[in-house]
């Protein structure tokens, strides 16, 4: 749409009505007054996109059309996007409530632990089956691997960092083997005041950096092409890294879609966020 005829109580209102219908800025249009109106007549104008601005609005319409075009030929409607945003908002609300409940439960548990005192400490000692370093050293020794293990004590967890040669198979695809070893180690360690985690060759840190780099590259692609990008399925922790990496980006916005374990992240141009 390059020109619109509009009416109003006066010239100014008629122009505003035309600009609204064109979705254009006043500096980008030419205005032709058809009738100034009167006591019993409405003002009438014809507002058209000026020659030097036509290319900008044509490109805007082209980008919008590309965005709405699904890979399989379907179209993402405004209604569907709105529903997805509402569902995402509701999910975030539920997550906040869950975290609030977890914190409340943690405080209550801490109070119980304080009241139990020495008896609780005895129980913890009984529940501790084996020291993590002892278990991990034996595990890799059995596999014929010489490794160095360092216990890194953080505020909320203890990370047992393992370094050695040719340990890729103990990390596995997307860290699946590593996470299994970490889970088994935490079980054998019994109840402790801090979480027990295992890391091999700094995989956890590298994975975080890899996801942040992926988010940056895909955001640049979306900003350049005006089309959304769908990432591969990820677990909640990895999707959260993508969302956090792009939350302050003024050109794109993110949205999680699908159901577990196949839930994935989509990156959209920010100009369509509120549509």
Image: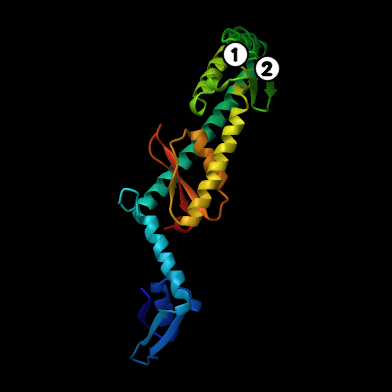
Callout 1 secondary element: helix
Mark drawn on residue 67: none
Q: Which residue is mark 2?
A: 148
| Mark nearer the N terminus (2 vs 1) | 2
Relative to 116, is 70 above or below? below
Mark 2 crowd level (few <14, some 14–19, many ≥20, 10 Å Cα): few
**In whole angstroms, how far apart are the C-alphas of marks 2 and 1?**
19 Å
Relative to 116, is 111 above or below? below
Query: Outermost residue, front direction?
Result: 166
Q: What percent of the width, then of the height, locates residue 249?
A: 56, 52
Q: What percent of the width, then of the height, locates residue 66?
A: 38, 57
Q: Which residue is mark 1?
A: 189
Q: What percent of the width, then of the height, locates residue 259?
A: 38, 36
Q: Of 271 and 228, which appears nearest the observer?
A: 228
Q: Residue at x 37, y 60 (%)?
A: 65
User: Colour scheme in the image?
Assistant: rainbow
Relative to 172, is 226 above or below? below
Q: Are marks 2 and 1 in contact (CB under 8 Å)?
A: no
Can you tell which quarter of the image residue 207 is in? top right
Q: Of 37 and 139, which appears nearest the observer?
A: 139
Please give left or right for residue 200 compared with residue 31 in the image. Answer: right
Q: What percent of the width, then of the height, locates residue 226?
A: 45, 57
Q: Quadrant of the C terminus?
A: bottom left
Q: Quadrant of the N terminus?
A: bottom left
Q: Residue at x 51, y 21 (%)?
A: 177
Q: Residue at x 53, y 55 (%)?
A: 251
Mark 1 crowd level (few <14, some 14–19, many ≥20, 10 Å Cα): many
Callout 2 secondary element: strand
Can you tell which quarter of the image residue 35 is in? bottom left
Of circles 2 and 1, the one toward us is 2
Q: How many marks?
A: 2
């Amino acid at each position: 749409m390059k020109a619109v005829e509009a009416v109003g109580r006066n010239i100014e209102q008629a122009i505003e009505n035309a600009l609204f219908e064109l979705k254009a800025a006043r500096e980008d249009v030419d205005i032709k007054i058809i009738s100034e109106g009167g006591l019993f007549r409405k003002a009438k104008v014809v507002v058209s996109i000026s020659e030097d601005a036509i290319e900008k609005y044509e490109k805007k319409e082209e980008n919008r059309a590309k965005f709405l075009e699904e890979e399989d030929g379907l179209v993402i409607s405004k209604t569907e996007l709105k529903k997805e945003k509402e569902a995402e908002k509701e999910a975030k609300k539920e997550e906040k409530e869950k975290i609030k409940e977890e914190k409340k439960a943690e405080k209550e548990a801490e109070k119980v632990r304080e009241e139990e005192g020495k008896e609780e400490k005895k129980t913890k000692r009984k529940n501790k089956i084996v020291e993590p370093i002892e278990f991990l050293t034996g595990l890799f020794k059995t596999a014929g691997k010489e490794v160095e293990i360092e216990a890194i004590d953080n505020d909320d967890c203890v990370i047992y960092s393992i370094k050695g040669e040719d340990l890729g198979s103990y990390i596995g695809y997307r860290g699946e083997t590593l996470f299994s070893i970490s889970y088994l180690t935490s079980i054998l360690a019994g109840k402790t005041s801090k979480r027990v985690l295992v890391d091999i060759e700094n995989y956890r840190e590298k994975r975080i950096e890899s996801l942040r780099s992926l988010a940056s590259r895909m955001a640049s692609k979306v900003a350049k092409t005006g089309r959304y990008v769908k990432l591969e399925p990820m677990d909640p922790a990895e999707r959260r890294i993508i969302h956090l990496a792009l939350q302050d980006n003024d050109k794109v916005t993110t949205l999680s879609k699908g159901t577990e374990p196949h839930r994935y992240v989509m990156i959209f141009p920010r100009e369509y966020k509120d549509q």
